């Protein structure tokens, strides 16, 4: 199990959420808490459950300064595209069984801020690029799984 939540720089409410998530996990699971997915995909090993790509993207956007319009325009967008490309290439090349969870945020309210809209758009791009590398893709809504591919 790979948890991509991270610490969110001292956010106590977030830390409580992560703690509750840890408590719910079965004790028998081997867990890695990381956003560094590429090395895990390159390694041989048992199946991976990545939860979730949405939080991976948040971390990647933090790292490239994507929330700031100037940083985004001054190389942040290019840096994020490189990270997404590296991840999708690792998915394509992995020999491991991989299950990835993501959110769909593009079918709801249009975010009020530019950075919120940027996140929504980038998550849609990431989900599409990731899904293009997968044999099976499911959309789960209200606990019901709809097969999109496979």
Image (cartoon, rainbow, N blue to C red):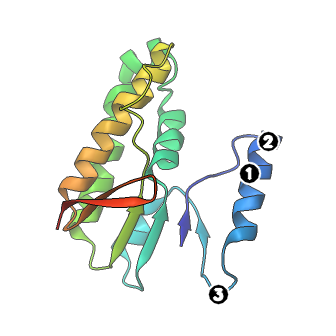
Q: Is residue 25 above or below residue 101?
A: below
Q: Return the residue nearer the eye: 145 or 68.
A: 145
Disc 3 packing (10 Å; few <14; some 14–19; many ≥20): few
Q: Residue at x 42, y 86 (%)?
A: 46
Q: State the residue position of label 2.
A: 13
What's the distance in space between the residues labelled 2 and 1, CA to CA? 6 Å
Which quadrant holds residue 105?
top left
Q: Are marks 2 and 1 in contact (CB under 8 Å)?
A: yes
Residue 107, position in %: x, y? 36, 32
Q: Earlier in the sequence, mark 2 or mark 3?
A: 2
* On-image quarter of the C terminus: bottom left
Q: State the residue position of label 1.
A: 17
* Left-right relation of 124 to 110: left
Residue 28's tag is: 3
Residue 6, position in %: x, y? 64, 51
Q: Secondary structure at mark 2?
A: helix
* Left-right relation of 26 to 107: right
Q: Return the residue nearer the eye: 10 or 141.
A: 141
């Amino acid at each position: 199990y790979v948890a991509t939540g991270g610490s969110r720089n001292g956010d106590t409410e977030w830390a409580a959420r992560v703690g509750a998530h840890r408590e719910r996990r079965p004790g028998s699971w081997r867990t890695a808490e990381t956003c560094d997915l590429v090395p895990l995909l390159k390694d041989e090993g048992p199946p991976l459950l990545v939860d979730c790509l949405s939080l991976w993207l948040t971390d990647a956007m933090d790292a490239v300064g994507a929330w700031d319009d100037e940083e985004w325009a001054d190389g942040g967008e290019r840096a994020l595209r490189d990270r997404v490309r590296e991840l999708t290439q690792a998915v394509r090349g992995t020999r491991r069984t991989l299950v990835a969870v993501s959110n769909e945020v593009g079918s709801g309210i249009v975010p009020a801020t530019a950075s919120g809209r940027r996140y929504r758009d980038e998550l849609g791009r990431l989900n599409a690029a990731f899904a293009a590398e997968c044999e099976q893709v499911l959309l789960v809504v209200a606990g019901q799984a709809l097969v999109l591919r496979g």
